[in-house]
Amino acid sequence: MIGISFRILWRILILLLGVALAFGVIDTAYPFLHQYLPIWIVFLILYIGLAYIGIPALIRLWRMVIKPNHLPVYATTRDGWASDPVNIAVVCKSESHLVRSMEKAGWTLYDEYNFFNFIKTGFALLLKRPYTKATMSRLYLFNRYQDLSFQLQDGNSPSPHSRHHVRFWRLKTTDSEHEHHDFWHNLLRLFKRQRSEIWIGAATHDISIFSLRRDFQITHNMDADTNKERDFLIKTLDDSNKIKEEPEFVDTGHVLEFKGQQFGINIIVDGRLKVIRLKK
């Protein structure tokens, strides 16, 4: 009873903080900035402050008590929103083995996610210019962001504006304390071998930019059919003769259509994980 009451009070507190934030922007920040700056600059400053500082801060306060209760079959944003579904698993010898195979199939590793590369990627997106190693945002599985990310840019003039991409997490025994550890290890136990590793991935296709996330940050607009993107990734590896045998299917038990981190997109998931083994 105490726990329920505390959660209700916490919701009310976050609501009041949200109202106070909105009031401060409308009643104080906007009039003050409008005295000195053109209105479009004022709106830009207020948007960046709300979408990238104010709203994320409120969400993280919310998550301190109201923990997300996600299915273990998709990665989440840092704030706990459901994002890309996990739809592929790769059995390989090592990280370098996976990297070599993906690069042979035409995929490139991304540049490290930092402020400089974020700005560089932003310009490449807006101007539709090539940047084959454009950085990618961090998504979380087992409470850690991806170990590896690859992309394959498409279109008449390849750029990060439209790209295939996949994030990989190595399945580690050190994740045993996480609630989803047993799910993944039990699901893939038949594929465990000595001197081999299992990497689980979330493959999606970015088709344009200027889609809004739930925190109102700008992001890519993605193709909702993630099953098609999973099959595209496998085809590129197969075409480069890197797959050892026919992919195997593992039923995750979760056939679903869910709303991801973006407004207006219902992500389609067939509930099957395709498992591939890479050639040496």
Image: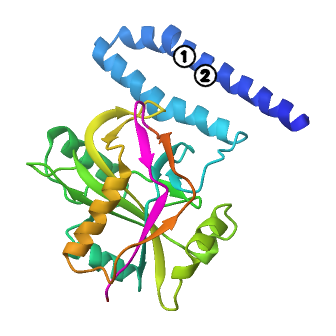
Q: Which residue is mark 1?
A: 22
Q: Quadrant of residue 41?
A: top left
Q: Is residue 64 left or right of residue 102?
A: right
Q: Is residue 219 visible?
A: yes
Quarter occupied by the N terminus: top right
Q: Is residue 274 on the magenta stretch?
A: yes
The amino acid type of the residue labelled 1 equals Ala
Q: Quadrant of residue 252?
A: bottom right
Residue extending furthest toward the bottom: 194
- Looking at the image, which residue is at 54% across and 16% down? 22
Residue extending furthest toward the left: 156
The amino acid type of the residue labelled 2 equals Gly
Mark 2–mark 1 CB contact (< 8 Å): yes
Above or below: residue 60 compared with residue 45:
below
Image: magenta residue range: 262-279
Q: How is the image coloured?
A: rainbow
Helix, strand or loop at label 2? It is helix
- Looking at the image, which residue is at 62% across and 77% down? 173
Residue 18 circle label: 2
Q: Is residue 110 visible?
A: no
Label total for image: 2
Q: Quadrant of residue 274?
A: bottom left
